[in-house]
Amino acid sequence: MSGSQKLVDAFHLLDATLPSAQFPLPLDGAESLRSLAGSLAHQVRDYLLPRASRLDAPLLAVVGGSTGAGKSTIVNSLLRAEVTRPGVLRPTTKSPVLICHPDDEEWFRSDKVLPGLVRTDTQLHDSRALHIVAFPDLPPGLALLDAPDIDSVDDANRALARQLLLAADLWVFVTSAARYADAVPWDYLHQAQERNTMLAVVVNRCPPGAIAQVAGHLAQMLAERGLASAKLFAIVERALGHDGMLPLPDVGGLRQWLGQLASQTEARAQVAVQSLAGSVRSLDPQLHELIGGIHRQNEAIEELREQSVSTYRQAVVDVAEAAGDGTMLRGEILSRWQDLVGTGEFMRSIEERISAFRDRLTGWFRGEPEVHAVEVAISDNLAAVLQEKGQWAAEQVAVKWSRTRWGRDIIVAEPGLAHPSTDFDAAATAAIRAWQSDVMRLVEEQGRGKRMKARFLALGTNILALALMIVVFAATGGLTGAEVGIAGGASVLAQRLLEAVFGEGAVRKLAEQAQADLEARVQGVLSVELSRYGAILDSLAVDDGATAQLESAAVTLRDAARSAFDDLTAPEL
C-alpha cells in the first residue's frame, strides 16, 4: 500500500472517530473544544481527504478577511468581470462564490470538496449554498472562492468563513489599512502560520500618502509572527471605476502571482504538498487537546457520580444504624410490643412466661388487634426512617452537584433530582413490608424441624418473627436513661423467647440474617433512587473508548504521514 493511500485511510479513520469527541458539560474550555472537534471534522472532509486522494486536483484559493475589506471587489477586479456581488449592507457576502475554469468545474461540483455545501448556479442569501461560476478567463488548475467575513455579525457566516479557510490550499487574506492590526485577523493568520499554509496578504484602502508606511508596518508584524514568507500586496484607496472595479495595476501584482501558480504544474504541486503537510502536522496537538478535554469531561462526570453514590451509600448506612441502635424500640413500637406481651418480670423463667401467656400469644393466629398493631407500628416507623433518609439523600446530592456550574445545570434542567421520585414513599413502605415477610420466612425455615415441639406450637411463627424483629432493633446505642432499661427488657424477653425455641447460636444467626435482609431491602429501594442520577450521567458521559480511539487515530495518522510525504511528489507532466 502506498504512503498516500495509508494517509487517505488514516483520514477515513479519523473522520469516523471524531464524532466520539463529545463535551456535554460546560467545563472551562468545553465550548472551544466542541468548536474544535467540529472544525476538524469539516477539515478532514472538506480538505484533507480530497487533497490526499488527489494531489493533482485544482488548487483552491480562498479569499477571506474582515468585514468591509473589499474582498468581493478584489475578486472581480482580478477577473475583470463582476462574478461576485459586493454589498453595502452588513453582513455582505452570504453564499460563498467559487470561480473556476470550466475544465475544473466537475471537480468542484462533486461532493469531494466541501461536501456539506449545496451547489447552486446563482448567488443566494444562504450560507450553506456554494455558488459555482465557470469562468474561461481564469487559468485552469486554480479556483478562487469569495468567502464570508471572518468577523461577520452573523454566526453562520463566521463559522462558514472559518470552514472555508481551513479547506483552502492557499489563502488570499484581505484586510484594510484601518483594521490590519485588529485581533481577529491575526488569530486567523496565526492559524495559517501553524498550518504552514501558502499565504498572500492584501492590505486594501491604504491612504495615498501612506501606502509604503502601512505596508512596511504590516510586513514587520508578519515577520514578527513567523509569517515573513507571506506575499504582501498593498492597494491604495481610491474611487472605483464605473464598472465597480479597481484599476488593473492596483491588483496586477496579486493577479500575476496567482497566474504563475496556476500555470506551473510543479508550483501547484508544491503548494498542495506544503499546505497538506502543514495541516497534518497541526492535527496532532489539536487531537491531544480533544483527548485531554474528554478526560476532563469524564473526570467531572465521575466526580458527580461518586457524590451521588457516596450519599446514597451513607443513607443505607444511616437506615441500618437507625434500625439497630435501639431507637426503634421507643415510642409506638415499644408500646405496641408491651401491649402484646405485657410488662414487668422480664427475667422470669421463660418456661413460666410461655405457660402464662400461652392463651394470649396464640391469639396472634386469630389476628387480634394487638398483633396487627405491632406489625403496623414496625412497618410505619421503619418506613418513615427510610423515607426520611431518601429525602435527605436527594437533597444532599442536589447540594453537592450545585457546587459546580455543570452540576447545577443538571439540577436546573432536572429539578426532580432534588427530591425523591414520586413513588418513593410507596416503594419504601413496600420494601419494609417485604422485609417483614423475609423475617417470617426465616423463622418458618428455622422452625421446620421443631413444629411439633410444644414451645414452637405455643408461640407460633408470627410472634417468633416479631420477636426476631425486636432483637434486630435491640442495640441501645441510641437510647439513654430509663429508655435503655425498658427497651432492653423488651428485647431480652424477645431474645429469650427465640432462644427457648431455637437455641442461642441459632438466634444469633437469625438476627444477623434478618439484619442483612433489611439492609438488602433498603439498598434495593435506594438503588432505584440512585439510578436516576446514574441515568442522567450516563446520557452525558463520553464513550469510554473515545480517548483510546482518538489516540489510536492520532498514532495511525502520524505513522501514515511519515511515509506519505516521501511518496507525495509532483504529478507527471
Image (cartoon, rainbow, N blue to C red):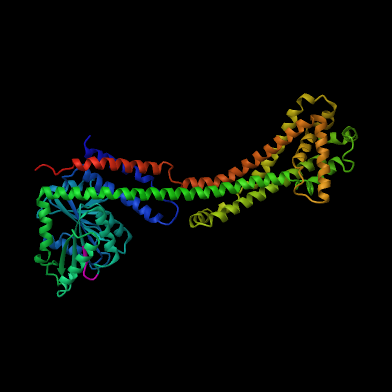
Q: Position of residue 525 (x, y in %)?
A: 62, 42
Check residue 177 for magenta coloring: yes
Q: Position of residue 390 (x, y in %)?
A: 63, 49
**Most prominent secondary structure in the magenta stretch?**
strand
Count of numbered badges drawn on the protein: 0
- Residue drawn 28% across the image and 47% down it: 44
The magenta-colored residue range is 174-178
Task: Work out whether residue 212 can be spotted.
Answer: yes
Residue 361 to residue 230: above or below: above
What residue is at 85 percent from the left and 40 percent from the top? 341
Percent x, y of residue 10: 28, 41
The reply, left or right, for residue 161 in relation to residue 386 is: left
Q: Does the image show residue 127?
A: no
Up the image or down, 351 lies above or below 263; here it is above
Query: Residue 147 appears at what percent x and percent y?
Result: 23, 58
Q: Is residue 262 left or right of residue 472?
A: left
**Is 10 covered by the magenta stretch?**
no
Please tell me which residue lies in front, 443 or 99. 443
Q: Nearer the viewer, residue 270 or 514?
A: 270
Image quadrant holding the N terminus, namely: top left
Quadrant containing the C terminus in the rendered view: top left
Q: Residue at x 84, y 33 (%)?
A: 362
